[in-house]
Amino acid sequence: MLKQTLLITGGAGFIGSNLCEYFLSKNYQVVCLDNFSTGHRYNINHLFEYEAFKLIEGDIRDYKTCIEAVSGVDYVLHQAALGSVPRSIADPITTNEVNVSGFLNVLMAAKEAKVKRFIYAASSSTYGDADKLPKVEHEIGMPLSPYAVTKYVNELYADVFAKTYGLNCIGLRYFNVFGKRQDPEGAYAAVIPKFVQQLMAYQSPVINGDGSFSRDFTYIDNVIKMNELALTTTNPEALNTVYNTAYGEQTSLKELFLYLRKYLAKFDAKIAEVPVIFGPERQGDIPHSLASIAKAKKLLNYEPKYNMQAGLQEAITWYWNNLKKHD
């Protein structure tokens, strides 16, 4: 017997496709909404074998599409967005149209459809210039990029919809998520798959700055677990708030490079000799990012399974077997 129906916006993207795959395996009906601006059909082609999977090709900037997508849906996992700080600096208008107006369209459609819960991808970029570590949910600074502004506005809208319309919302502030299906291509590719692809080609990755900047790199399976906990929690205190979605461990970019090179060298010994290049710091970058996951542990019983090194080893095996397939 099928469980309830999920709408996963951005379901052909990196995180979205992993969520689609997982919840189909858990016997949910899954509706994927994507316009394929940053997602890929090859991320979801294998999901069409599930009768419970439905694709709607459309854009969250179109309200009618959002209304169609939420029809008959019990829960929304909103992942659709234009990510990337540099992209938002280059084109703040489109970033705002997708991340704010698009978000509001999906939120409004969910409210009209009386969905049971609205879970959305928030961002660690919301912490802005707050320099206290680790990051705790109720202490944020001023945003450092248009992207950060848009993700903070999402949190404000969700809070207002919870208070005004009674729509149960949970925001998950993702910290540097990585794992299978993360796209290494394009100007705004995430650092891990981009570095992996370069190392596999014996090319030197470029680190922005001296390599001392650090991140709380978070393996995709931990993120899937957080979405599941947010979806299924029966704790009323856990609703209508935001959570750091991370492992709670710091890794510098130089350390990251050394781990990647070491793990890839197990597949190809020549990779161990590839050096790194240090370039200029990138505008809008936060120097250090480390999450406190105490709130998620307390209210959602979150216990992340994969630390950064364990996740990297899983991811690199996947990258090695798959990255060359979509050249």
Image (cartoon, rainbow, N blue to C red):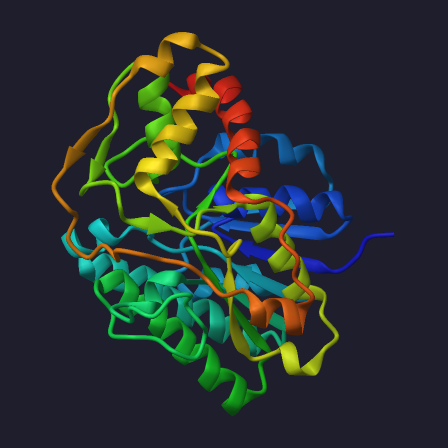
Tell me if 298 is positioned left or right of 196 in this view: right
Q: Residue at x 50, y 91 (%)?
A: 164
Q: Position of residue 44 (x, y in %)?
A: 56, 36
Position of 133 relative to 307 (above/below):
below
**Nearest the camera: 24 or 58?**
24
Residue at 15 percent across and 46 percent down: it is 281
Which residue of the protein is positioned furthest toward the bottom in this rendering?
164
Q: Is residue 280 above or below residue 266?
A: below
- Any part of residue 217 in sight: yes
Taking the image as shown, residue 15 lies to the left or right of residue 214, namely right
Does residue 257 sit above or below 94 in this rendering?
above
Q: How many marks can you see?
A: 0
Q: Quadrant of residue 100?
A: bottom left
Quadrant showing the C terminus: top left
Q: Looking at the picture, tell me which residue is in the foreground, 309 or 244.
A: 309
Estimate the x, y position of residue 128 in percent, counting from the top left.
28, 67
Residue furthest right as drawn: 1
Q: Residue at x 52, y 34 (%)?
A: 180
Image point (19%, 57%), residue name:
284
Residue 101 pos. (x, y %): 34, 68
Q: Nearer the viewer, residue 47 or 312?
A: 312
Q: Is residue 73 visible?
A: no
Q: Residue furthest left?
A: 280
Residue 275 lies left or right of residue 248; in this view the side is left
Tell me where residue 76 appears, x and y as whole percent. 58, 63
In the picture, measured across the screen, residue 299 lies left or right of residue 87, that is: right
